[in-house]
């Protein structure tokens, strides 16, 4: 006997309810599912990492100067995460997808503001995978320590082969900022000659302890030899700001990554060019840029007065950008990497130029 209309409607409603329930469950646990996919599933102690880069070879560098002999300084740039993970705790330096993301997204947006002040040296390194930044497991900390050894070797190669006593800047973004912090602590702050040649250091989206920074914090734009570091959240996300600090890892004296909490964090406001809690209204914002896909070296169009920013309890709170081009999009993993735009592109460009002028004047 065939089912009546009422039975069919009941079955249809039940099926739709089941589909909605499954969809909601998948959405709720999607982050956990992606994390499981990206987990190398092998202890770091038994993991066999990819071959080490040879920084004497151009192939080990993502960016090297061309004919920029007129640039007054150098920029040593440490890239953010572009490798999601899966097989590896640390990325091979020739991973095609990671390299493409650096060329298309990270270089134009985050190296771009510094092209006018210096020759660019950006090493490839066996970066810790995105998965290692999403967990506080000891394996993940070991992967990040391992990545630092490459950056240190690249910096030493750059100093011996290319620097020749020139002024320089250190710029690091996200994971690259954490590695840049260790580089400043180990290589720059301990060497008076190097420290005297440092124009400034910018650690973007990076938590730095305020009670023991390796360099004096930047407090005004006429200051050179200082440190500008900040980690940002969207305006009003106080829970996100607390989580960011609670999960932040910083280096201790033994070269290990440990939790920042309960220590305070350093917060530089790029709009004001100062480490301060003073508010920066949107009218002072010089300009953001979405430079993804832009030809290397081309200066993007700026979107000015897009955001207001203020440091609160060690975190930079930034208002919602007016332009949709300045909002995070893409996959779950993409939204957890450095975004494909730079909210403070023009501000950092002007800041670096001012600090270089201050360095030259002194």
Image: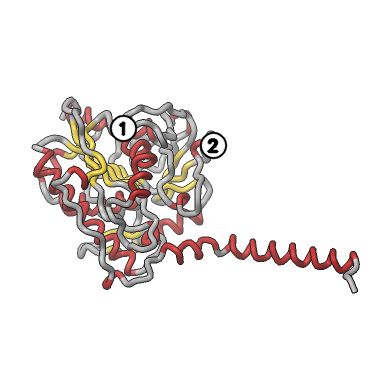
Write down the quadrant of residue 163 in the picture. Answer: top left
Percent position of residue 213, x then y? 25, 51
Quick one: 102 or 237, which is closer to the camera? 102
The residue that disc 1 covers is 351
Quick one: 283 or 294, which is closer to the camera? 294
The residue that disc 2 covers is 324
Percent position of residue 165, x then y? 9, 37
Question: If the image is split into quadrants, where does the N terminus sit?
Answer: bottom right
Can residue 49 be spotted in the picture?
yes
- Residue name at image x 29 percent, y 63 percent: 143
Question: If the image is split into quadrants, where does the C terminus sit?
Answer: top left
Report whether 119 appears left or right of 210. Answer: left
SS of the residue under disc 1: helix
Report whether 223 appears left or right of 324. Answer: left
Number of disc labels: 2
- Residue name at image x 21 percent, y 47 percent: 60
- Residue name at image x 44 percent, y 38 percent: 279
Give the label on residue 225, or none.
none
Identify the colour scheme used.
Answer: secondary structure
> Quick one: label 2, few (<14), some, or many (20+) residues within 10 Å?
few
């Amino acid at each position: 006997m065939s089912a009546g209309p009422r039975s069919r409607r009941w079955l249809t409603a039940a099926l739709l309810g089941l589909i909605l329930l499954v969809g909601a469950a998948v959405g709720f646990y999607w982050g956990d599912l992606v994390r499981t996919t990206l987990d190398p599933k092998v202890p770091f102690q038994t993991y066999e990492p990819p071959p080490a880069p040879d920084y004497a070879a151009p192939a080990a560098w993502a960016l090297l100067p061309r004919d920029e002999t007129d640039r007054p300084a150098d920029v040593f740039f440490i890239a953010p995460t572009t490798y999601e993970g899966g097989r590896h705790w640390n990325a091979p330096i020739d991973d095609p997808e990671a390299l493409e993301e650096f060329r298309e997204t990270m270089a134009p947006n985050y190296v771009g503001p510094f092209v006018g002040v210096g020759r660019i040296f950006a090493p490839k390194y066996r970066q810790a995978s995105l998965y290692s930044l999403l967990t506080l497991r000891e394996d993940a900390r070991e992967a990040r320590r391992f990545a630092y050894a490459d950056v240190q070797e690249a910096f030493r190669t750059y100093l011996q082969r290319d620097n020749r006593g020139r002024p320089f800047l250190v710029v690091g973004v996200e994971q690259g900022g954490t590695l840049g912090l260790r580089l400043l602590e180990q290589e720059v702050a301990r060497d008076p000659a190097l420290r005297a040649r440092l124009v400034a250091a910018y650690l973007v989206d990076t938590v730095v302890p305020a009670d023991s920074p390796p360099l004096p914090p930047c407090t005004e734009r006429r200051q050179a030899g200082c440190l500008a570091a900040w980690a940002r959240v969207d305006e009003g996300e106080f829970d996100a700001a607390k989580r960011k600090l609670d999960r932040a890892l910083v280096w201790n004296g033994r070269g290990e990554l440990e939790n920042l909490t309960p220590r305070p964090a350093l917060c530089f406001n790029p709009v004001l060019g100062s480490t301060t809690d003073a508010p920066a209204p949107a009218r002072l914002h010089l300009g953001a840029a979405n430079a993804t896909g832009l030809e290397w070296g081309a200066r993007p169009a700026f979107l000015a007065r897009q955001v207001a920013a203020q440091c609160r309890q060690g975190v930079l709170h930034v208002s919602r950008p007016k332009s949709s081009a300045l909002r995070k999009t893409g996959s779950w993993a993409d939204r957890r990497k450095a975004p494909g735009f730079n909210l403070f592109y023009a501000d950092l460009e002007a800041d670096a130029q001012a600090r270089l002028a201050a360095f030259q004047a002194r």
